[in-house]
Amino acid sequence: MSILDCAIIGGGPAGLTAGLYTTRGGLENVTMFEKGMPGGQITNSSEIENYPGVTGEITGMDLMMPWPAQCQKFGLKHDMVNVTRVSKKGDIFTIHIEDGTTQDAHSVIIGTGSSPRRAGFKGEDELFGKGVSTCATCDGFFYKNKEVVVIGGGDTALEEALYLAKICSKVYLVHRRDTFRSAPNTVSRLENTENIEIILNSSPDEVYGDNMGVTGIRIINKDGETRDIEVPGVFTFVGNDVNNQTLIQEDGTFLCDMNEQGQVIVDISMKTSVPGLFATGDMRIAAPKQVVSAAGDGAVAALGAISFVDELLN
Ligand code: FAD
Ligand code: NAP
């Protein structure tokens, strides 16, 4: 089995851009390990309006659709597998795959992104997939002309509440504080949407239902007053956790230096503390968590990987 010049873990905007730049930049043997369809978490977004040069109403899926074919044109291979671990012995990295097989590589670019966090209220786990959701584009249509609750006060919650307001008869936006984290433009769109009721200083207490799924949610405000809202759908958008599991070694330590939030520490070239290992996108320290910056990271890391492999082998 030949050793890859570069193994890319994750096929979101960061991994795909790394794939484009490594292959087009001269690395011949590059595989992107992506467990699902390439595109990353933005493919769950109903609308993206801040990717430079892309105007008009487009979904995250529309944006990402052409990226894999562009990379494949320059020779990027896609292996649709779940990577369980990345390790390094001497100069060689080993990619451990869920089916028990392995693949060696001279360099690794990791961009496994982040995943939606659970809010932690009663009933959330039990009713997840039965009325509790973290994806409006996936599940919004089930609630056409019905009422839903959205939890959260960041960009994702507000944008997805606006999306749901176009499908649902009413959206209750429940946020635990009285100010939002979201962009001001998004906040004003929210405030000017007639069928969105904004409920501030309130948190979910318990979501409940019957054997058909969710029937309602009880929220509680800062003064301890509760309110029951009868809805069949509850969408939670309360942030993301970094997907860093593949960097955990057999002894429980991380392959490279991490910060206390589990984000990978990198320099401005996306180099980690381990030579030949680069980290990109949402999983790195100080990530702006944007498609454009994840793509930028992928390009920077790819240029670093090309130089690294060149020096190693020549
Ligand atoms: P991701 O997109 O998370 O991709 C990581 C990939 O790695 C995934 O495809 C995953 O399947 C794969 N993976 C993970 N673990 C493994 C493994 N063990 N083995 C194999 N593959 C693995 N940004 C904007 O700029 N504008 C927006 O309007 C915007 N809207 C958003 C709306 C929503 C609902 C969400 C959730 C995010 C939004 N973002 C937006 C943020 C943006 O999507 C992310 O910043 C960006 O996708 C990060 O890219 P990434 O490549 O780092 O990671
Ligand atoms: P976020 O910015 O971390 O916001 C999470 C929200 O959920 C916060 O308002 C938080 O409240 C609330 N929250 C957290 N835990 C909670 C809990 N247990 N119960 C109730 N509420 C809870 O996450 P995000 O909105 O997913 O955004 C993640 C990143 O992606 C951000 O950097 C964002 O800018 C970016 N993004 C950008 C765009 C865009 O550019 N258009 C779109 C989507 C996402 P507090 O405010 O009180 O902490």
Image (cartoon, rainbow, N blue to C red):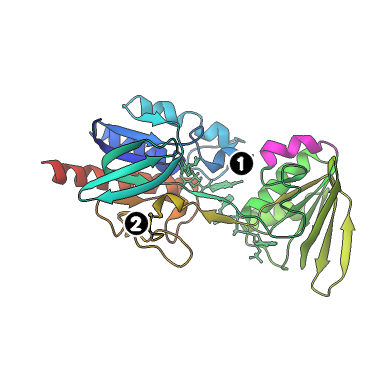
Q: Look at the numbered discs 2 and 1 and tell me whether their residues touch, using CB distance below 8 Å.
A: no
In this rendering, the count of numbered labels is: 2
Q: Which residue is mark 2?
A: 255
Tell me the amino acid under the disc marked 2.
Answer: Leu
Q: Ligand 1 closer than 8 Å to the CB at disc 1?
A: yes
Instruction: Locate residue 10: give its quadrant.
Output: top left
Q: Which residue is mark 1?
A: 45
Q: Secondary structure at mark 2?
A: loop
Q: Main secondary structure of the magenta part?
A: helix
Front residue of 266/248: it is 248
Observer able to see residue 200: no
Q: Is residue 272 left or right of residue 64?
A: left
Front residue of 169/133: it is 133
Q: Residues within 10 Å of mark 1 (few under 14, many from 20)?
A: many
Residue drawn 14% across and 41% down? 313
Residue drawn 85% across and 48% down? 209
| 155 shown above or below 83 | below
Residue drawn 57% across and 37% down? 43
Q: Which residues are magenta?
A: 136-145
Residue at the left extreme of this rendering:
314
Looking at the rendered image, the quarter that the C terminus falls into is: top left
Q: Is residue 14 left or right of residue 221?
A: left
Mark nearer the N terminus (2 vs 1): 1
CA gap, disc 2 and disc 1: 32 Å
